[in-house]
Image (cartoon, grey):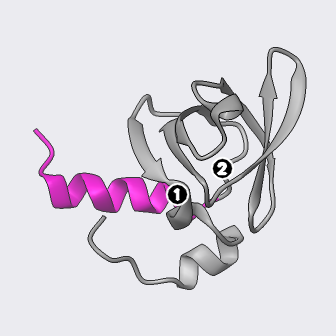
Amino acid sequence: MIKYKEKRKKVWRQVITSLCGYNVEIIKSKSPEFQNFKGKIEDETAKMLKLNINNKKIWVQKKSQIFRIEFKDGTKTRIDGKILEGTPEKRLKRKTKNW
């Protein structure tokens, strides 16, 4: 069994890369219309994610959502959108707090 710290490091390594292509679900949102959306991440900017949901393209803010992301290795994790803010290059430079 993977220890919590090791799992967190593994997830962080995946988060600092581009999120395009990952399956995502919006668990919690300030905007109720986005709650429980499931789709695939198609594009990302510093503050927004472009999701493909049932062949509809929508843009959602990273900051005001809590996401469940399924990585390509099958790992699912819950991540606050505030952690995802910034481009992958800026996330790479950022130090993480215990989240």
Residue 71: in sight, yes or no? no
- Residue closer to the observer: 72 or 50: 50
Q: Main secondary structure of the magenta part?
A: helix
What residue is pinned by disc 1? 15
The location of residue 85, given as percent across then percent down, is 63, 67
- Residue 83 percent across, percent down from the top left: 50, 65
Q: Label 2 amino acid? A: Leu
Q: Quadrant of the N terminus?
A: top left
**What residue appears at the point 55 percent right and 85 percent down from the top-left corner?**
93
| Residue to which mark 2 is pinned | 19
Measuring from the top left, give residue 13's x and y in whole percent: 45, 61
Q: Check residue 69 in the rendering and tell me which mark sits there, or answer none.
A: none
Tell me, yes or no, whether the highlighted magenta stretch contains residue 66. Answer: no
Q: Residue furthest top?
A: 54
Q: Is residue 14 above or below residue 55?
A: below
User: Which stretch appears magenta?
Assistant: 1-17
